[in-house]
Image (cartoon, coloured by chain):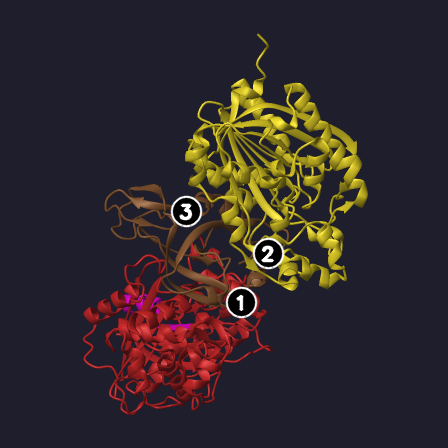
Amino acid sequence: MPQQRPETATGIHGWGVYIPRFRIKMEDIAREWGWSDSQWKALAMIEKAIAGPDEDSTTMGLEAAANAMKRAGVDPGDVGAVFFGTESKPYAVKPSATIIAEALGVTPVTMASDLEFACRAASEGLRASLGLVASGMVKYAIIIGSDTAQANPGDVLEFTASSGAAAYVVGPSPGSAAVFEGSYSYVTDTPDFWRREGTPYPRHGEGFTGEPAYFAHIIGAARGLMNTLGLKPSDFKYAVFHQPNGRFPLKVGEMLGFKPEQLKAGIVTPLIGNTYNASALIGLARILDNAAPGDRILVAPFGSGAGSDAYSIIVTDAVEEKRNKAPKVDELVSKKIMINYSTYAKFRHMIRVVRE
Amino acid sequence: MAYITGVSMVNVDRHYDKGVKRLAAEASSKALEDAEPDTLDYIIVSSSFTYASDVQLDIASYIASYTGFRGVRALAVESGEASGLAAVSVAKSLIDSGLASRVLVVGVDKLSEWPTWKVYGHFSKFYDVEGEGMYSIGMGGIAGILMRLYMETFKVDRLTLAYWPALMHSNAKLNPYAMLRFAITPEKVLEAPPVADPITLLDSFPLGDGAAALVIEGSGRGNVLAELVAVESATGYPSIALPEDPLRFESLERAYQRLTQRADIKEVDVIELHDSFTIMGILELESLRLAERGKAAEAVSRGYFSLGGEGPVVNPSGGLKARGHPIGATGVYQVVEVALQLGGEFPGLKVPDSRHGLAVSVNGSGSSAYIAYLRSVG
Amino acid sequence: MAGFSAPAVWRGRTHRYRLVAGKCTSCGKLHYPPSYSCPYCGSRSMVEAELPRVGRLMSYSVVYSVPFDSKSRAPVILGLVDLGVARVISEITDASPEDVSVGMQVEAVFRRIAEDGGTGLIVYGIKFRPVKGA
């Protein structure tokens, strides 16, 4: 009998999302910076979500985690790890994970830390958590991906860089809404996107973020996982990838051999933008909001720098009773307040204000 | 027995050329003109913003020496917006106890020293900083909540409430110490920029500097302006979120009840009360039972509290609204004004033949309340 | 409000983050923020209790005269929220003045409630927003 993979001992007990209510239309950004409409249409974008002036990755992360805990229904005292993945930390030094852990009532006997790997930090937190849970070191772990993504005004990145958060409570597979079947990581040193210490906006390699970075790493992770598990694209009901725009996840899915109907359920970026650490995880949440027991899902977040993790998940019966315990992605996407460019610029601290 | 034998006020204004000590010294020296400084037992200083804005500690001692009273006993009293009357109550206690026979009370504060956005931040400290004070209360946020609640609860429209500031401005026209000496119509109040909607700029006290002083003596020889019969106070709920009925100032009700137990108050001719915002004046009138609940604004609008009206004359000085509200000094102004009315010497709108007067101070939304009863001696 | 101490921010974290009220074991009433004694009966026998997160807006003020650090969200809507078992003063967020009315349902959200300039601490805590999104 082959040895069981450790991931199979783990599962998703709760998933939760937070999307801020403010939205800006692509037309407004294009008009402000002299882009032609073809620019954002090529990215398959419509609107992006903007955190309000009193929101940041910590506040959004807490809201998502609280939603995940509602679905998980676990005692906060049984949570042994809180991992917060972001590239938009409110404090350069001082963890957000502790603030969230405190607000959830998880403190003090817990691991808690902020992770950084561009858009993939939360995913690495997830994979590490599977190990912690499978080994029995912790009973439950909360993994949060949250970003108020920054983009230099006028940079093409501004069409997509948005705000949002997703969180997962993972624990032992019994009772979970979806069990893990396997996981696989694929990481190289690829400088496709970076932000230097003390600078407000990232730089990126435009096309270089594509083939050698996004596509190479997601394909590396997804193929590696499928080979390891002996699965092929047709074995999955859904596949969801990091989605820096509306186009890339469709393309990478196609390159891997998935069909559009397997991909569409997990693509939310056209309506809310790229939420960075939450991007693929919000897509997965939307799938869990609608999936049926027995559905197999491939999830592959990606982070510049670069790396990707691929997970295979099988939905259980418990998904049905959990999904109505917190707001669904579509509800969060539909609650919106449209704002103009100047309000967006003010909310995201793009107007230089001198303070004491 | 405690008598007010000397009074003085500096006109409320933006005194950019004078610091806290200078304003206090001017008021103190004038109040003491007739009294021998050597026989002064105590100086009680009332100041709130000097602490809130980190200007000076041990302010009472520095005012004493600066004014020329080095050697006198001095202490400062801080009770937020109610500091002035708190200082008067301490002074009266010293007189009543026999520990002192002549006490100078001087209230002083300056609001023009800093940009308004900073002053707004200091105002939040009138409220519980572990509770609502952590939020962006600004100028009038809590009073704005009370005003809307009042309008909704008692079905009072905004225009009816605008008669209060109109009356205050009308009263202040003759007061040489008032900061805003111009008339306004109720309609104008509604047109003014919002400060903490439904509160507009013309519902709100102006940001000015001021100092006022008075001398309290145990025996009524010489120039007695009025008798300070009693001062009472009470603490109240630390937040309007706590009482079942946020539109009642329990602290003021209790302070008034205590005052009436201490002194037999048969009638009141003149009141100076704490109308930092229109709604505060209205709610205080109702807490003092001078108007039925929900009816004070209407009573104001038909002239009940105006000179010649049926009720006591309220804020002939123009009140905090038009005279001004230099925080720690305000209560001292009020007692000085009531004493001058009772002595027939108020230089502004006079309330003829007034014999009984009240001064009322409240901090924030009623965390504390003070009330003083003065009587004429003639 | 600018310039608060790290210990003060730290001490208030539980009641601010989780909307934890004081509950009197003598009269059973709740009050927020938790006090050393019951504001209703004076008892000093207190336990903590989390407040409901959905309530009704009893009254509000639209504050234009705000300190500079609040300017990016001016006018600030300050509300008196009735949570049934207790009331709280809080900010109403994600809303313009025209979205707000007395009696409307509001729900708790976790937000930045104050910050100490550009280099000091961020104070997190509960605000409320309309339950009905736009």
Is residue C115 placed above or below B42 in the rendered structure? above
Residue at mark 2 to residue at mark 1: CA–CA distance: 34 Å
Is residue B47 placed above or below B299 in the rendered structure? above
Residue beneath disc 3: C19
Q: Who's yellow, chain-wise?
A: A
Residue at mark 3 to residue at mark 1: CA–CA distance: 29 Å
Residue B318: x and y in percent read: 40, 83
Which amino acid is tagged 3?
Leu
Chain C drawing hue: brown
Label of residue A139 in the image: none
Q: Are marks 2 and 1 in contact (CB under 8 Å)?
A: no
Which amino acid is tagged 2?
Arg
Residue beneath disc 2: A23
Q: Is B259 situated left or right of B317 in this image?
A: left
Residue beneath disc 1: B119
Q: Who's red, chain-wise?
A: B
Instruction: Please check the rendered image and state whether residue B104 is part of the magenta-colored stretch, yes or no.
Output: yes
Please identify the quarter of the rendering in which residue B53 is found: bottom right
Which of A31 and B324 lies nearest the eye of the viewer?
A31
Residue B355: x and y in percent read: 25, 85
Q: Is B301 situated left or right of B136 in this image?
A: left
- Quarter containing the C terminus of chain A: bottom right
